[in-house]
Amino acid sequence: MEKEKSNKKWIILSGICFLVGVTLWLPNFILQYGYGFWILTFIINPVGAVFGYLGKSKFGIISNIIMTFSFFIIMFVGYLLAAFFA
């Protein structure tokens, strides 16, 4: 019983790290200006991946790893769109 409660705590912390990572990207998309808050995803989301590992949550691990590399993913998609529509 205690182990399930401990796992749930780590899963919740992992989810919070994921949501913080998404929130750090929002000013760039909403305001269309290059704020540097997204750089914190390189710090916060690996910690969230560790929390997901401690909570044995595959979703927590994968979502935080994707957010860690979100800069490279967004750059790839941006260049791909520019190549197709420019």
Image: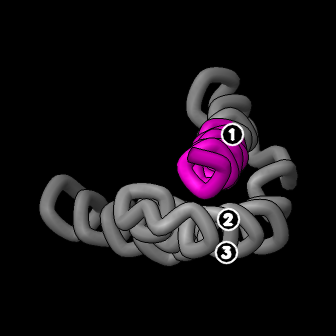
Q: Which quarter of the rendered picture does the N terminus lie within?
A: top right
The amino acid marked with disc number 2 is Phe
Q: CA distance from mark 3 to mark 1?
A: 13 Å
Residue 45: percent from the left, percent from the top?
69, 64
- Seen at 32% across and 64% down, the residue is 77
Task: Left or right? Give the position of 54 relative to 42.
Answer: left
Circle 2 — which element?
helix
Contact? badges 3 and 2 (CB < 8 Å): yes
Instruction: Report the residue that reaches farthest toward the left.
Output: 84
* Sequence-first tag of 3 and 1: 1
Q: Which quarter of the rendered picture does the C terminus lie within?
A: bottom left
Instruction: Write down the residue under mark 1.
Output: 16
Of residue 38 and residue 13, the one placed in the foreground of this image is: 13
- Residue 9 among those drawn in magenta: yes
Of residue 83 and residue 24, the one placed in the foreground of this image is: 24
- Seen at 37% across and 57% down, the residue is 59
Q: Write the start and end of the magenta stretch as one range.
A: 1-19
Q: Residues within 10 Å of mark 1 (few under 14, many from 20)?
A: some
Q: Which mark is residue 50?
A: 3
The amino acid marked with disc number 3 is Val
Colour treatment of the image: one colour
| Figure check: 76 above or below 11 | below
Of residue 80 and residue 83, the one placed in the foreground of this image is: 80
Q: CA distance from mark 2 to mark 1?
A: 10 Å
| Figure check: 14 above or below 62 | above
Instruction: Write down the residue under mark 2.
Output: 51
Q: CA distance from mark 3 to mark 2?
A: 4 Å
Q: Which callout, 2 or 1, points to the residue nearer the camera?
A: 2
The amino acid marked with disc number 1 is Ile
Residue 34: percent from the left, percent from the top?
75, 47
| Figure check: 37 above or below 39 | above
